[in-house]
Amino acid sequence: MASGAIESFDNKARREFESLGRTRVYRGELLRHPVYTRVLHWTVALFFFLALFTGFGIYLPWLFRWFTPFFGGGPLSRQMHPWFGLGFVFFFGLQVLNWLAPMLWTAADTKWMRNVHKIVSNEEKMDPPETGFFNAGQKVQFWEIVGGCIVFIITGAILWGGAKYFGGTAVAVSYVLHDISALIMLGGIFIHIYQSTFGEPGTFQAMIRGAVSEAWAWTFHPAWYKQVTGRDPVQACEEARRKMEGRR
Amino acid sequence: MTNGWIDIKNTDMMLIMGGNPAENHPCGFKWAIEAKIHRNAKTIVVDPRLTRTAANADQYVQIRAGSDIAFLGGVIRYAIENNRIAKDYLVNYTNASFIIKDGFKLPEDGLYSGFDAEKKTYDKKTWNYEEGGDLTGKPVTASPAGKPAPPPAPGAPPPPALLPGKVAYDLSLQHPRCVFQLLKQQYSRYTPEIVERITGISQDQFLKAADLFTSIRKDGDMKKVATIIYAVGWTQHSFGTQIIRTAAMLQLLMGNVGRAGGGVNALRGHSNIQGATDMAGIFDILPGYLKMPNPADTDLAAFLKRTTPTPSKPDPWESFNYWSNTSKFTVSLLKAFYGAAATKENDFAFNYLPKIDRNYSWVNLWNDMYEGKVKGLFAFGMNGVMIGPDSNKNIDALKKADWLAVCEIYPDETSEFWRAPGITADDQKKINTTVYRLPGAGFAEKDGTFVNSARWLQWKNVAVPPPGQARLDQEILATIFLKVRDLYKKDGGKFPDPIVNTSWAYTTPYNPSLPEVAKEINGKALADLTDPKTNVTIKAGQQLPGFAWLKDDGTTLSGNWLYCGSWTEAGAMMQRRGTEDPSGLGIYPNWGWSWPANRRVLYNRASCDIDGKPWDPSRRQVWWDEAKQSWVGNDVPDFKVDSAPKDHMGPFIMNPEGIGRLFVPLGPMNDGPFPEFYEPIESPIANILHPNQSSNPVVKKYKTDMDKYAPVGGDYNIICTTYRLTEHYHYWTKNNPMNVELVPEPFVEVPFELAERMSIKGGEKIKVSSIRATYIAKAMVTRRIRPMKIDGKETFQIGIPIHWGFRGIAEDEGKTAKTLTNQLTPTVIDPNAYTPEFKGFLVKIEKV
Amino acid sequence: MADRKTLQADQISGHSGASPGLGMQRDLEVCKLIDTTTCIGCKACEVACVEWNDMPFQPTTFDNTYQTMPKTNWNFWNLIKFNEHQNADGTIQWLMRKDQCMHCADPGCLHACPADGAIVKYANGIVDFNQENCIGCEYCVSGCPFDIPRFNPMTKKVYKCTLCSDRVGQGLEPACIKACPTGCLKFGSKEDMSFIANERANQLRENFGFQNAGVYDPQSVGGTHVIYVLHDATDPERYGGLPKNPTIPWSYTVWKWLFKPVLGTFALFGFLGVLAHYVTSGPRMAQPEPPTKEETHG
């Protein structure tokens, strides 16, 4: 029932947003993320960074106080931070609904994780053939953010209410958990940005235009490539290599 | 105060009762704390409520409001039984040894001898000393048959009884009619068991307190000193003066009067109430406590004969009898009043003075206004509606007046009596009183003096000028006076002379400067004067250095003999700010100026033994210097300085006997020479000592339709007392946001057990009703007032602060019920000082 | 140290011989002594505090007590707490304790505060808030074991008693001290105040029957620059909740001073990490990779 309702909500949202924007998929490209997903992603990103930068000013002003003037000073940063956080959690929540199915953990993910060192070190040029729409690394980050958001919401509420309502101890503990959660998420975000830009060129456009090259698809998400094109990713890659060499 | 604020630091023991100095005199209370810290002084607080003063006490004793005489009488009994009395002091400095007339009767049945049940007054002729000599060791005989008094002429009043010049006395204090034996007999009835039944204080608690207080006289030691501190918790009863008398007797018995750290100390409730009293704030005195003439005083000589006492003492003793100078004080005062119009030929204009034919005290004025006899009222610096008692009666009285002039700094309940809750628009149309509101100046906007409880005159400067159209009091008063005088000059009248001839020699007649007035009060020479002993001369027009210079021949002028010396040729003594204290006793002789003659502790001769040596060598106030043949000391001796100890002059120089009065003969007290315990007019039980004479026999109830009094055993069975809070000043500060922040709303303090029984929670509104009116406020449920067993019956007390009315910040915001505490209080007064009984009346409470 | 000597006598006019007070070392640590056994709850200190610090009035409501308000507020830094304490024998002790910042030697608020320079502890022991730097995070509120700092919803900053650092800096006593009528409040060097407090506690034990009288100067926060004389120092809680063992939450000591900067730096290492990865392993390219330049030319 619930999954059905979520599915129909997401489908409706995707349809609505598709009518508001569009995704051009050129020859040799595949549709990666529809408009709804992209809009959600960047909204989440926007709130994340707003919360992050306002949070920096609270976390370590001696290092980050130069962020605060952008938000009208320290006190205003502090005032807006929870609202940004709420925006982040809310829109990420929509993204969770949107991505719930592809983000479910599979046996292939476990296998992927076992080989992660080969992928990180670039020993394996292509992802394992079982790698679907999202790889295990993306899923780990996704679920980390889900967990992080839960921590943020609970500890954030306590910090927002303050010692007046929740007592000094709760605030003191929440403060540490909130920080730790943010630090983990921050670390993840470095990897996320790197991977989606310099680390794996061609990824960024997936969230910009919504389309990726077929080569990108068969390299990083072979199972997904197979699923949408019906072609074998390894073969497709070999074909392309031969074509490229032939041209030369 | 016999002593002073700072002097409290010299004490070893404090009994604080009928006062709440920590709350109502917080600045003065510092000296109580100094005594605790520097002398390990102990504090006993006896109060119906555990107050902020009690919170600081070594022993707190909860007493039923109005039962103070029973408690103090019990302590007197305890002191005598346990020999915790100052024997030498008692014999030599009090009238303990004086023999009282045969026929004097103690009030075992509630009445002293001589009671006239119809007039409710006493014929006091038996309240007198026996004439005679030394009866020490002589067998007791019947009263010597004196000459029988001639029968009074029909219709004429009998000649007033006088004190005998030579008093019979028994220095062994064994004579059954000597004051000491009578006193012992009087208080032998006040056993711990009786004290418990009357006051609600357990015998255990009472004995602990009595033992602690009298412990300073253990084994006859005279070094330690105890003080008694009180305020209006004692005065505001239908027997208030007698409570204070009981305290004075206890202090005399224990030899604590006149000594540093001792005395009977009244804490005045306003910054200048002492000054108001000194300057004749009450109808029956003139400035300096001179008596007011009555219609029988047909000329100055008759007046002086009536008011000037003659010595009355054991023959070998001396008495200074300082009031023998009454004529000098009176004539100098008349010269100040009437200037050149007061001549020897016209009795110094004595007949310009009004003569009092009846009681014109506060409550009687309002009663007269209520009965339509008083037609107009000037209200300066007081809020008569709020003050009460029975505020509703005062409001109704004002409705009947023709005019009312109120000089205030805030719109107050008196000037807006016509807006009191319950008065409808239709009612208002029927009120024909014309109200004039005069914008006065606040205390910080005026200069002048305050006279504090310690009798110090202290000059203060203006802090800020009066705002807007506000005017100084003296400007308003002078303007009214000069206009009235012009009318008398123009139109004449029945007796214009006193008004037309009033001396008004000020530089700016419409706005006299207060230094000028202060100098006039001090007094000056009107002719060249020379002291024959010292050959010192004072030229005409010069300020007088002290009241010893006052003359009754019209050559001196003084507005108040007690203040003579406060502004001399040497300058304004009241403006001095010297902080030297060579003795360390807190005398500060060069700070301000203290009446009389800048002495700080009254009767300080009594701080020395009979030979003139201080009882306690570590607290030397004054002493006899044999070489100089003079009394000298750190304080100004309150004594004839060249009277050697062997002359045995009494230290209480204002009494014709020269000694302290344990027994008050003849005139001063209207309800008995010894205090007797009477129940308040409204009391939950009949007096267990004499149920047939439960309350004070000479107290009269008022008879208008508004005067109702709750009977014993009726619906009204909770005892209610009223008081002020630290956070507020009377009815003013309810207009000041800071004070309102500290205590925002009216409340009623209710004992926890009573609240529980009536399921009243703290903060809930309750209705307090007396037989006269109701009062609504939130309940403060507290364990600081406990239920009491009065004569075995469980009895509750509640307390209401007096501060809120129908004008103020909380009132105007609609946060209060706009009822007045004093709507509850009964119209009944003490027969000696005419103070209303605000403490200890009966109420009932209900949830609203 | 030169600055500390600015108010010491060096030379005085018209005086032969050595100048009095020359070279005298002034005790730098100040202290407020509150003798609860002589406090009369008159609230003069409350008024003086509001007046001196020019704080706006706020409406209050009757709350079944003499206490002005339940807790101190951003515009009310000095509050006398009234407590009707029932003794074991059934008698009532009405306790009054002036509540305000304790100016801890080891201040929890300062530990908790992340904002650079928002809380300053002076060499004389005063812990002061500098609202200019306050970011309103309210961590100080939870870091304070005495529940003192208060947030002003209008300015979004936190306020508390300054021990009148402005007055003390000019050689005056704090406003509350000046207003106290009974002398239950005293101000001076920590050494002197501790001495007077201990003498008084001694007197209470020996002459007034308070067996447990003592001085409250909790060492768990390194001692305080506001100390109390209590009738019963074994039970400070009865004085309107004075904590027996005030402590600063570990999260503000261990976490803030050690792990927070360290972990914060680690997060930056994330940036360096990915950079290192790019440099050492290079990007992962979509396959097949286009030929290299060299290959193109070859």
Image: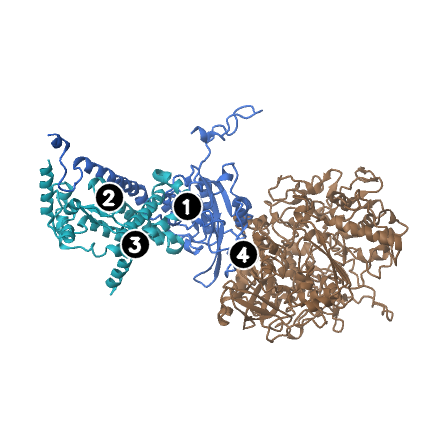
Chain colours: A cyan, B brown, C blue
Q: Residue type at mark 2?
A: Phe
The residue that disc 2 covers is A204
Circle 3 residue: A19
Label 1 sits on residue = A76
SS under mark 3:
helix
Q: Does B834 sit above or below residue B561?
A: below
Q: CA distance from mark 1 to mark 2?
A: 33 Å
Q: Residues within 10 Å of mark 3 (few under 14, many from 20)?
A: few
Q: Amino acid at mark 1?
A: Leu
Dot 1 or dot 2, earlier in sequence:
1
| Pick the front one: C210 or A138 | A138
Q: Give the total number of marks visible in the rendering.
A: 4
User: Image quarter for residue B535?
Assistant: top right
Across and down, in percent, residue A79 comes to 40, 48
Residue situated in front as seen by the camera: B43 or C38: C38
- Depth check, mark 4 against mark 2: the one in front is 2
Q: Closer to the N terminus: mark 1 or mark 3?
A: 3
Report how far apart the C-alphas of labels 1 and 3 lie in the structure: 38 Å
- Front: mark 1 or 3: 3
Mark 4 belongs to chain:
B
Q: CA distance from mark 2 to mark 3?
A: 23 Å
The picture places residue C67, in percent across and down from the top left corner, at: 50, 56
